[in-house]
Each structure stands twice: as C-alpha cells, then as structure tokens.
Amino acid sequence: MGSDEKFYITAIGVSAGGLAPLHQFFAHIPADSGISFIVIPHLNRDYVSMADKLLAQHTSMPVGWAIEGQLVEPNHVYLIPVNKMMTIETGHLYLQDRPVEDKSNWAVDIFFKSLASAHQAYAIGILLSGAGSDGTLGAIAIHNQQGMVMVQDPQTAEFTGMPESAILRDHPSQILSPKRLAQALLRFVSLT
C-alpha cells in the first residue's frame, strides 16, 4: 500500500450469535464504499466453515479467506481462516497457526492490536455478538491510536459478552444495531 493510498480498514470481531448481525451489517454496505473489511469470527477448530459462502450472499464485494502475505484492498472482504491467528503489517495480512493449547480464542484482540499499530487513525474496529471479552484490549489499542471503535448494542445481541466488555472497559464511538452500525460507518468515512 503506497503512502498516498490511505483508506479505512474495518475489522469486525464476532463470535457466538454473530452470523445474523454480520449478515445484517453487510447487507447495508455498498460495494464501492472504499473501505476494506477484515472479518474475525471465532471458528471451531475442527469445523469446515462455510462463513465465506454465507457472507457472500449478503454483499456484492469479493469475499474470501485470507492468504499469507495478501495485500489488503478496498471494497474487499477477508476472513481469518480456521485455526489461524492473523495480523496486518504494511497493508499485508500474515497468518500464524493458533496454538493447540489455547482454550480461549483471542484472535480479535490480536488482529485489532496489529491494525491499531499499522493503520492508526485509519483503523476501525467493530464488535458484534459474542461471549467472553475478546476484542476489548484490541478496541482500547485502536482508540489509543486515534482509530474508531463501534459495538453492537447489547440489547440487539444474542450473546452480550463481547460488546458489553468493550463498553465497560473502553468507550466506543457508537453502540448501535448492526444496520445502524453500517450506516454510522459509512457516514463517518464520508465525512473524513
């Protein structure tokens, strides 16, 4: 990514109960927003995921599993592969095997922190429905680098752990339903 090619990268952390909100969010994002999207779902280690095919039904942007060293481009959606951790550096995605001994999944925190470091004010983190607190420390890192954090309104989430944790520990810019998160994101990007 050249220094003159600044664009927003939006990372979306999602876990239990998050597929429907994720699909609702993308149903309200046009294909030409100029934003790149990285989706970090908590995927079962032994499950052959169809998350890419399911999500592709709700957006006309290209959707695919991230590949080692892949350049991130606007108007594309990248998903973290099963059993991987992912970071971003100089506009490229890097994958590591998820340690077998990890009982908890911290993939959202790991990616959010790397996004904050790499893209500062052009980093946007969104947390949707999910159990636990993954994403909270990453959200704080994004805010500390002048990026923006938004979370799903817990009243609209099937599992409230991830959004509530971020609300308690951080101060998200927006706390909204998935549809309204999409609208707020587009409004924010259009004003900057």
Image (cartoon, helix red, strand yellow):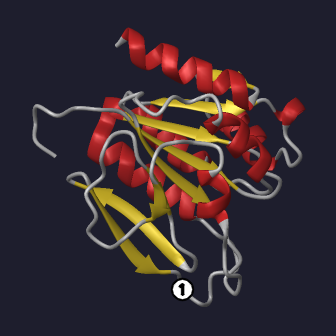
Q: Residue at x 37, y 43 (%)?
A: 116
Quadrant the C terminus occupies: top left
Residue 105 picture location, percent across and down: 64, 69
Q: Residue at x 63, y 21 (%)?
A: 174
In the picture, measured across the screen, residue 50 lies left or right of residue 81, that is right
| Residue at which label 1 appears | 99
Q: Is residue 51 above or below residue 137?
A: below
Residue 18 picture location, percent across and down: 76, 51
Residue 148 picture location, percent across and down: 48, 28
Q: Is residue 68 above or below residue 7?
A: below
> What amino acid does circle 1 point to?
Pro
Residue 132 picture location, percent across and down: 77, 57
In the picture, measured across the screen, residue 139 lies left or right of residue 133, that is left
Q: Residue at x 65, y 34 (%)?
A: 27
Q: Residue at x 43, y 51 (%)?
A: 113
Q: Is residue 77 above or below residue 183?
A: below
Q: Please, which residue is most extreme toward the top here? A: 191
Please tell me which residue lies in front, 33 or 145.
33
Please tell me which residue lies in front, 87 or 74.
74
Query: What is the total number of numbered labels drawn onto the structure image?
Result: 1
Q: Please, which residue is most extreme toward the bottom here? A: 100
Mark 1 falls on what kind of element? loop
Q: Is residue 55 above or below residue 176?
A: below
Dot 1, crowdedness within 10 Å: few (<14), some or many (≥20)?
Answer: few
